[in-house]
Amino acid sequence: MDKKEFEKIKELYDNGNNEIVPGHSFENHVLKVYENMKKIIPDEDVDREVLEYATLLHDVGRCYERNCGHAEKGAELAEEFLIDDLGRNKKFADRVSECIRHHSNRPHLEPPNREAEILWIADKMHAMGATGLCRFLMTLGAKNYSCDEAVRFLKQRVLDAEERARDFGFDDMVEGLDPLKDFVKRYEEENHAPD
Ligand SMILES: [Fe+2]
Ligand SMILES: [Fe+2]
């Protein structure tokens, strides 16, 4: 991808309805996911060009939609952008857009190919560790979740992420979820005393 196209993608994140929260911005999140993807692909037999565009465009839907629908919205926007603005063919745009559509955690949206699985894990790696915990709580705080609701949601997300990461063959990345698990455990110990 040339510099001009990269700048055009970056500009897309500055447009929209300003729905994006700091923990999900282009600089603070999308570029980190891009770095994660680059670390993963040397050992993978994948279409690198599809993954590059899919990674950089994966959260563009968040500019318009904060909730789970951002993956679908992003898939539509990316397809339109690749065809209309970058002059790419429909087949390429579809492949990029499929990865974006399947990067959310919705159970019925299992990634359909290896490129989509890699985008999913690269995104999830930025939701792990102390950084991931901080981003998660900031995001739910911006949506007015209570502490109990946020931790319940986090607990479920951790379980789902662990299962999927193992399914996709990324067992060595599961330990990144430990800080999140420890946090949930300590929160429950402090706030839910046994009867
Ligand atoms: Fe996302
Ligand atoms: Fe993301």
Image (tube, rainbow, N blue to C red):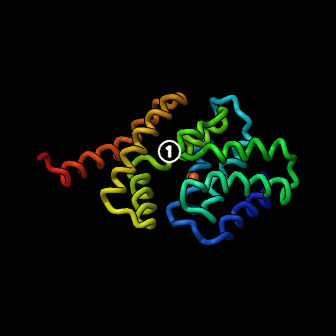
Is residue 164 toward the left or the right of residue 147 in the image?
A: right
Q: What x and y, as percent, mark residue 48? A: 72, 39
* Residue at the image position 51 percent from the left and 31 percent from the top: 170
* Residue at the image position 69 percent from the left and 47 percent from the top: 54
- Count every numbered label the image shows and give the total: 1
**Residue 194, placed above or below residue 46:** below
Compare residues 122 and 153 and report the one nearer the observer. 153
Image quadrant in which you'd find residue 27: bottom right
Q: What x and y, as percent, mark residue 167? A: 51, 28
What residue sits right under mark 1 in the picture?
125
Residue type of the residue flagged with mark 1: Met
* Residue at the image position 34 percent from the left and 50 percent from the top: 152
Compare residues 76 and 21 and report the one nearer the observer. 76
- Neighbor class of circle 1 (other Cα within 10 Å; few <14, some 14-19, many 20+) is many
**Residue 175, placed above or below residue 152:** above
Image quadrant in which you'd find residue 38: top right
Q: Residue furthest left?
A: 195
Q: Which secondary structure lies at badge 1?
A: helix
Residue at disc 1, CB closer than 8 Å to ligand 2 = no
Is residue 20 toward the left or the right of residue 157 in the image?
A: right
* Residue at the image position 73 percent from the left and 54 percent from the top: 76
Is residue 188 toward the left or the right of residue 84 in the image?
A: left
Q: What x and y, as percent, mark residue 18? A: 60, 71
Q: What x and y, as percent, mark residue 24? A: 54, 60
Image quadrant in which you'd find residue 20: bottom right
